[in-house]
Amino acid sequence: MAATLKDVAREAGVSIKTVSNVIHDYPHIRSSTRERVQQAIASLGYTPNQTARNLRSGRTGVIALAVPDLSLSYFAELAASVIAAAEELDLAVQVEQTVGTREREIELLRTPRLRMTDGVIFSPLEMGQDDAEHLAVDYPLVLLGERIFDGPVDHVTMRNVAAARAATEFLLDRGRTRIAIVGAHEGEVIGSAGLRLRGYREALTARGVPYDESLVASAGEWHRVDGLQATRELLGRGVEFDAVFALNDTLAFGAIRALEESGHHVPSDVAVIGYDDISEAAYSLPTLTTVDPGRDWIAQRAVEALVERIEDPTAAPRTMLADFRVVERESTGG
Amino acid sequence: MAATLKDVAREAGVSIKTVSNVIHDYPHIRSSTRERVQQAIASLGYTPNQTARNLRSGRTGVIALAVPDLSLSYFAELAASVIAAAEELDLAVQVEQTVGTREREIELLRTPRLRMTDGVIFSPLEMGQDDAEHLAVDYPLVLLGERIFDGPVDHVTMRNVAAARAATEFLLDRGRTRIAIVGAHEGEVIGSAGLRLRGYREALTARGVPYDESLVASAGEWHRVDGLQATRELLGRGVEFDAVFALNDTLAFGAIRALEESGHHVPSDVAVIGYDDISEAAYSLPTLTTVDPGRDWIAQRAVEALVERIEDPTAAPRTMLADFRVVERESTGG
DNA sequence: GTGAAAGCGCTAACAC
DNA sequence: GTGTTAGCGCTTTCAC
C-alpha cells in the first residue's frame, strides 16, 4: 500500500538508485532529473520505510529506558530528562516499567521487546549486588541507580553518601542535633537507603553527635503514605527530635503531614529535608529543602554513555558520578 | 557478529527452513533434527533479528505515545497506564514529549521517529479544533484529550462537562454555594478548562445558584504554582467563597496552600475539590476530594482502539467516552 | 520431513 | 550522471 522506492522510480522513469540519490542529497544529479523525482515522491506521498533502513544499517535509532514505575515522580522526571536528552541526538526512547520487583527487573533484561533497540538504560530498584552477573548482556547497557556497583557495565550514578552527609550537616549547621531518619531499610548496606544512612552517620560522627538508633524509622517503600506512617510511628514511640532527614522527597511530604497533624510545626518545631529535588518540592507547603542529586546530568550522561557504548562495545566499563547540591527552601527555616 | 539463521543452519547441518521450523514450533520435525538445531542455537547464542522480522511482517510491535511532558503527574500516570496496557498485548511503547507547544505538537505528527511504530496515541494540550486537519495522517492514530472533537480519527476521552457538573453538585450538596473556580482559560469553549467550566455553570443553573464571574480565577498553565497564584489573587481581590473547584489536582494543591497560608482552613472554611485523581491526591494533607475521570480505562481503551485501527485502517472513526466518579476525601470535609 | 529460493524495502559498491 | 545488483536476516511458498 505505501509507496516504495521502486514505485517512485517507475513513476519518475528513472532507476531506484537515482531516487535514492535524490533522497540523500547526492550532489551530482541533473536538476531536471531531481525535479522529476521530487515530483514523483510528492505525488505518491512516498516516505522511506524505516524498518528496511534499520535492517540495512543494523541500527534502529531507538533506545530503551527501563524504570520501576512512571507513577513515581522521581522516575517520571528522570524519564522526561532522558527523552529530552535522547531527542537531542535524534534517538527515540522506548519506556519499560519493571513495577519494582527483582524478578521483573531480571526478566526485563531478556525481554524480546528490547531486541529492537540499539541499547538500554536500566534503572533497577530491587536487584542487588549479587545480581551483577545478570547485567552481562550481549547488547549495550548503561546502569543507573545504587543497587549494583562495579558490575560489568557502564554506570551513571549519584554521590549518595556525600550528598546525605551534606544534607545532615546542613541540619547540624542550623543547630538541629536530634535528627530523625525516615525511610531506612534495615540491614541494607548498598542501595539508596543504606548509602544515605551511611552519609548521615558520617556527618554525626564528624561533628561528635552520638548516633541514636531510636531516631531511625524504617519504610520499605518510599511513597508519601510510607513517610506518613513511619513518622507517625516515631511520634507514637515518643521519640524527641528537632529535624527529619527523609530519604526521598515523597517520604518528606508524608513526614510533614504527620508532623502537622500532630501539632508540630515545620520548620519551627521540626526542620525537614528531603532528597531528589522533584519539581513538587518547589511548590509544596512549606516548600521543601532537599538534595538535588544531579538528575538531569545523570539522564544526559546516561544517553551519551549509551551512544558511546553502542559505538564501541569493547571499551572498559566506566562509572560516572553526578555532582549534587543542597537546595534550601522553607522546610528548614530558610 | 550476532549469529543468524544461516549460521545456525550451518552449525546444525540443516537448511535455514528447518531452523525456522524449530523456532516456530512447527510440529512435523524429526526430534533428532530438532535437538541438533536447538543445540546449535544454544551454542551460538542465536536470537532472531527483530528488525528483519519487522521488515518481513510489516509490523514493529511498537506504538508511540505522545504526551506534553512526563513531569506533569497526570501524563506520567497516563503513560504508566498505557505502557501497562500495551504490555498485555505484547507491544512496546515509545514515549514522545511535545513540551506543550502547538507547533511541537503538529511537528511531532510528522517526526520520522514515528515511522518506525505501528501507530500513535496522541495527547495534545495546545492544538485546537482548527487543527483537526493535521490529524489526517497516513498511519494509525488515536487521539486523547479534549482539544479536538469529531476529527478524522478515533478519539478516547472523558466526560468533562458531566464530570465537572458532578463535582460542582457535590459541593452544592454539602451546602457550599460560593464556589470559586481555579484554572479557567478565558474565552475557551473546547478544551479541559472550557468544558469543565461549562459543567460548573450547568450545575449552578440547575440548582438556581447565580453565576458570579468574580469567582473565576484564570491560570494559563496548571502547575501547583499556578493554583497558588490564582487563589492568592482571588483572596487578594477580597472575593468571598466557601469552596474551590480546581480544574485539576495540581492546581488544587496550590489552592490549598494559598488558603492555608492566608489562614483559611480546608475544609471547614473552604472546601476544595480537584480533577484527575492523580495518586498524590490520596496522600496530601488534607487528602484531596477529586474526580476520577477514568484514566486507566482511557489508557486501556486507547491501546485497544489503536490495535483495532492498525488491523482495520478503513473503519469509520469512533469516539469513546470513559466513565467518571467523584472520589470523596478530606478536602471537602469527608 | 526438509530444502531452495523469492522477496520485504533499502543502501552502496560497482559498472557504464 | 545514472543503472544494475548484491545483500541486510527473516518468513514462506513450493518442490521433492
Image (cartoon, coloured by chain):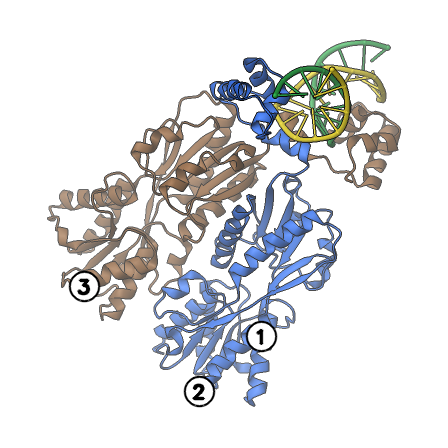
Chain colours: A blue, B brown, C yellow, D green
Q: Which kind of residue does numbered mark 1 sit on?
A: Ala
Residue that numbered label 2 is attached to: A175
The answer to which quarter of the image holds residue A68 is bottom right
Q: Is residue B23 above or below residue A169?
A: above
> Is residue A103 in view?
no
Q: Which kind of residue does numbered mark 3 sit on?
A: Leu
Who is closer to the viewer here, B189 or B36?
Answer: B189
Q: Is residue B43 above or below residue A188?
A: above
Q: Which kind of residue does numbered mark 2 sit on?
A: Gly
Residue displayed at 53% across by 82% down: A214
The subunit letter for the residue under badge 1 reads A
Using the numbered discs, state the Cα–Cα distance from disc 3 to disc 2 in whole angstroms.
37 Å
Q: Are circles 3 and 2 on residues that touch, CB within 8 Å?
A: no
Residue displayed at 63% across by 31% down: A53
Residue that numbered label 3 is attached to: B235
Using the numbered discs, state the Cα–Cα distance from disc 2 to disc 1 in whole angstroms.
20 Å
Residue A29 in the image: state x and y as whole percent: 58, 23
Residue that numbered label 1 is attached to: A162
Q: Are circles 2 and 1 on residues that touch, CB within 8 Å?
A: no
Residue displayed at 19% across by 60% down: B234
Which residue sits furthest bottom? Answer: A208
